[in-house]
Amino acid sequence: MNDFTWLIGGEAGFGIMTTGVVFSKIATRSGYHIFDYVEYPSLIRGGHNAYEVHVSNSDASHLNPSIDVLVCLNKETYEKHRSRLTPESLVVFDQDEFEIKENIKKIIIPFKKILARLKGQPVMKNTISLGASIGLLGGDIDELIKIISEQFAKKGEEVINFNRQFVQAGYDEVKKNYSDFILNYLVKKPGDDKLVLTGNDAFALGSIIADIRVYVAYPMTPSSTVLTDLAAWAEKIGIVVRHAEDEISVINTAIGSSFAGVRSAVGSSGGGFALMVETLSLAGITEIPIVVFIASRPGPATGMPTWTEQGDLLFTIFSGHGEFPKIVLAPGDNEEMIELTAKAYNLADQYQLPVIVMSDMYLSESHKSVEKSFVDKFISEYKINRGKLINKVITNDKIQMTNQTQNSNIKIQNFLRYQITEDGISPRLIPGTPGYFYQANSYEHIEDGHTTEEAKPRIDQVDKRARKWITYLENDFLMPKVYGDIDKSETVFVSWGSTKGIVLQAQKLLKEKNIETTLIHFNHIYPIDTHKVKELFKHDKKYILIENNSWGQFGKILAMETGIEIKNKILRYDGRSITVKEIINKL
Amino acid sequence: MTNIQDFSGYNPTWCPGCGDWGIGIAIKQALVQLGLSPSSVAAVFGIGCSGNMNDFLNAYAIHSLHGRSIPTAIGIKIANHKMPVIVIAGDGDTYGEGGNHFLHACRGNHDITVIVHDNGVYGLTTGQSAPTAQKGFKSKSTPSGIIETPINPLSFAITSGATFVSQSFAGDAIHAASMIKAAVNHKGFSLVNILQPCVSFNKINTYQYYLQRVYKLGEDYKKDDFREAVQKSLEMNEEKFPLGVIYQVEKPSYTDQLPQLKNEVLIDKKRFMEFDKITKTFI
């Protein structure tokens, strides 16, 4: 069985997160796919952390109902997760720390004694448990030692060797006492390089591919690792990352840098985005491109910071005062996150409007393996499209200051930044281009950017901006992907964003029981092509809406845009993602 | 060379006698004297009578949102740090709605010039009191007199890390122009706080009021002494208004401290293509 779940749990602040990523990387380096998920409270110390890794032979982005190997660094881990054990599950723990009375397969690793013998810190229980886990799963200990060596490379040979002893101790303990229990689930097999990415990593990577130059953010869970990823790479890549004083400054800084000509993005969760929406409206009227990343968590207000929800959808599509076009995308997994993020930067430039990429904690913080060949191929095929941007700026300061004034006969012209065009998109000039000037005006304006309160130019500009949506729907909007054969299915699932992998797994299991189903999965969320989308709902089928929120928000958008109402719903809003089982049980 | 006409857009709509006229002339005069053209300077306007200068001044500009012109200017500077960036906004905009941005722009020593029209009232919304209004100032929003004490823009800026802090008076356009020029030439965050009568809604802080209370700093004034500058700025609290450069020190600006901008302007950089350097960290 090369499809299993390993879960490690312990007190927050004891390195569970790092240990989990190491385990995921061992699995991918051994030729397997992974999807992992972390549960943690909004605390740095204390409270319970749990990190589970779903290892599979094939691509997956869902969790299994049962746990095959449970590593308990404290008693709470066992108590919290025992309901997911099967008679075959192995439970790793230290009898010197707590007792387990139930008759289960116990793998007793003397963490305490090993720590005492090797003079280790309590946090190094993780290292021992990794050694023990690799031993139990028939994995390659050299691969583990290699990762540990990479982790501590900067700290030198001594630290590496010190850590190595703990890995070996855990591993030896299993080999010596539990050789009969060893499961060959993680035996190394050939496989191509895989990247272990979170959805946030995928957004950051997609942004780099798209030539982002300025990223501005204020930390907010679960979006913060986009900021820390890009900040860590900034000097190497040559971009600027600004951690501004608040989210209002965040988006206005990005508006400034985008106006000046570089691709710019901001990121936050729902609460931070709420602070940005006035400026989203500014981007709408000034037609300054911007990419906004939202990683949702359950609201309202502070809500449940470290849990997941798709509760910001309606807020997002309606965000900003006044009427202006925006584009909302919601990737279903890491591959889509890379593709749609890079596309978002093109769309923002082509249509000169805000493009919002929506994620949630489940997608943003879970790692999922992505074939490196997929990323390489995408990079080689991706083309930057800056739309109607004219770049003739001369940044050498001397030339810039004197160029157009050397010949005094040439009058500096007011560029028609908001020229009325058929497709709604006006030429855009990078500020600093000699011979011209223009203003990007937050007031309603005429074609050259000057303020107006007259009726006709107002109508002309409103209509011009609105035409950008029509152009987008004709040229760049993509219909939802349909998974399955709708003619053969009685049930048609409808979902968007991060629930994709979960529904696909449910379909797979149902198919094993000879039940054909179809999934209509939206990732180009708003606007949608009303007529084409309507067609998908004309069949006499049982449509079931699946969303991680309590209102069925996407269902409301569908109803608003197409008149279609989906009565059957699977909605979950307790901070946890929808499970495969819930979907199957609903049938 | 450019001339005043090159920078002149629509005819201003300010009230006759408004201090904005003097400031408007001073800004254009300074830009001409700096050898700039409408193509080579970026301006970010706030919302208010001062921000309405967006239609009267030719430049690459954003007419921003109320309170948000400073971060917008910071963004322009980051993308093109060779371009002079000026903010033109009011006291309510800068010290009220955008107070947090002002504080952090000082801290960051962002190389932008903030020109504040300081008239103690919200003119465009017909005269409510601003954060710089004297305590007890009666207005439509504070009919019994404002309870809060006024912001002191000078000490606020100096103690927050600004490296150029100056004050001028709308009644002296030549002085204002010289302050704006010095501020734009300064590398780092520069403030030009311009005291300005609002002839329609502020019957207290009139031209007469200011003429009796402003004075120019002497040549012996040491502008690089932090303590003395703070001391000097506190005279504002006693309704004495020093004009001139109150404080100026040389410190690296925000963009000076970004190694990635050392040799190139962000808008000119070649696209980063060594993706393996990033992807390998995830294997």
Image (spheres, coloured by chain):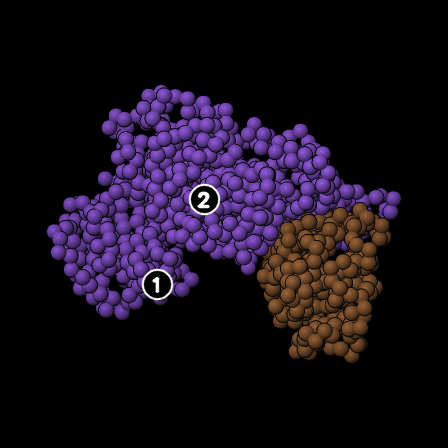
Q: Residue furthest right?
A: A409
The chain holding disc 2 is A
Callout 2 environment at 10 Å: few (<14), some (14 to 19), or many (20+)? many
Neighbours of disc 1 within 10 Å: few (<14), some (14-19), many (20+): few
User: Helix, strand, or loop for circle 1?
Assistant: loop
Q: Residue at x 48, y 32 (%)?
A: A560
Residue at 30 percent across and 53 percent down: it is A50
In the displayed structure, would residue A122 be above or below residue B123?
A: below
Residue A521, x across and y down, in percent = 41, 32
Foreground label between 2 and 1: 2
Residue A13 vertical position relative to residue A239 in the rendered view, above or below: below
Q: Is residue B281 left or right of residue A159?
A: right
The numbered dot on residue B224 is none
Please, what secondary structure does the residue beneath circle 2 have?
loop
Tell me the kind of residue under disc 2.
Answer: Asp
Q: What residue do we see at 45% from left, 31% from top?
A: A559
Q: Which residue is mark 1?
A: A45
Are labels 2 and 1 assigned to the same chain?
Answer: yes
Q: Image check: A233 left or right of A369?
A: right
Is A127 placed above or below B165 here? Answer: above
Q: Is residue A565 visible?
A: yes
Q: Which chain is brown?
A: B
Chain seen in purple: A
Name which residue type carries label 1. Arg
| A245 displayed left or right of A514 | right
Disc assigned to residue A312: 2
Percent across and percent down for residue B77 are: 66, 55
